[in-house]
Image: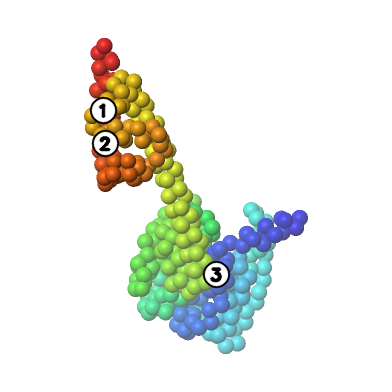
Amino acid sequence: MANDSSSLNNNISFSKEIKEELTLNDDLTKEATISLLSAFIKCNGDFVFGQNEKIIIKSDDVKVIKYIYSLFKKLFDNINLSFAYRKRMRFNKSTEYLLNVLSNIDEVIDLLKIDFLDNKINTELVNKDDKLRGYLIGLFLSSGSCSNPKSSNYHFEIYSKDENFAKSILKLISKIKVYVFSFKMIKRRNQYVIYLKKSDEIASFIAYLGANDSSLTYEGFRLDRDFKNYTNRQTNLDMYNYNKSISNSEKLIETIKNIDEFFGINNIQNVKLKTLCKLRLEYPESSYSDLASLMSKELNMNISKSNVNHLIIKIREMGERYNNIEKKE
């Protein structure tokens, strides 16, 4: 059981880490706070009509809902808020936390410019850089997710049930001045998903939101994986080159043996060719560079790697000629 508990503790999603880091941000301007709350309620809020009208705000993360509570308290004096929670009976039976806004309803709707019927984003909420950032933080806190950086499947997403609102989010992101992000949109079941798959852009977007520690964590895992992938590719390439070199060496040795049997290596008039044939038989695993060095010592002259390569081509051509002669006979 202890192992199961430890495994559960280690499985805290990276999305949750980002969101909880964002809840530590207490330096938002009043305008950015308004934009954040408006976006959050737009995605995760419901308005209850009637004699006891209220706004119900939902979240799966208790720290996020407490953060939303603290922002309300900063903006509205003497506002009546209450907490509740309920267990979902389907799927993983997770807990959903509720924040009920029980007073100042008209003031909240007016200040946060909330319209539950219009799926466009009010320009007054995003016409400044800090407002724009605040609105995007609200969107991510309410309906965003990010793949674990340990996974090679990089994915950053923001969800919406409404297509027009999702398109508005895309336009909103395109207004960011400090970065250029290549977000795209797809429909997945009954939701529209704004997503980003480039790992470096994901790290930059997380940093833009203000979750710098999470961004560094993401970058660290990404760079580590890229380095390991590069190392693996280099190792595979080295192994391929080694195997190819051995294979070529074996074929060349077979050719030299055929020449020796048909004509005799000692009868080769070209001294360089004769020396290379003998050295290749004596040192079957030596590289072209090693053979060049051995030939230089043997012949007391400078033999380059390219010279060796040229001579090997000559040996192969010689072997082909003798093969053709044998076939004719």
Q: CA separation, marks 3 and 1?
A: 78 Å
Q: Which label number is shown at residue 19?
A: 3
Q: CA separation, marks 2 and 3?
A: 72 Å
Q: CA separation, marks 1 and 2?
A: 9 Å
Q: What element carries label 1?
A: loop
Q: In this view, does 75 lie to the left or right of 312?
A: right
Viewer-side residue, 48 vs 217: 217
Q: Which label number is shown at residue 268?
A: 1
Q: How crowded is mark 3: few (under 14 residues within 10 Å), some or many (20 or more)?
A: many
Pinpoint residue 128: horizontal percent, then vertical percent. Answer: 37, 79
Residue type highlighted by circle 3: Lys
Mark in front: 2 vs 3:
2
Viewer-side residue, 324 vs 43: 324
Instruction: Please state the total of marks drawn on the protein image.
Output: 3
Residue type highlighted by circle 2: Lys
Q: Is residue 178 left or right of residue 44?
A: left
Q: Above or below — where is 1 with respect to 99? A: above
The residue indicated by pointer 2 is 272
Residue found at the far bottom of this picture? 77
Residue 295: which quarter of the image? top left
Residue 99: which quarter of the image? bottom right
Mark 2 or mark 3: which comes first in sequence? Answer: 3
Residue type highlighted by circle 1: Ile
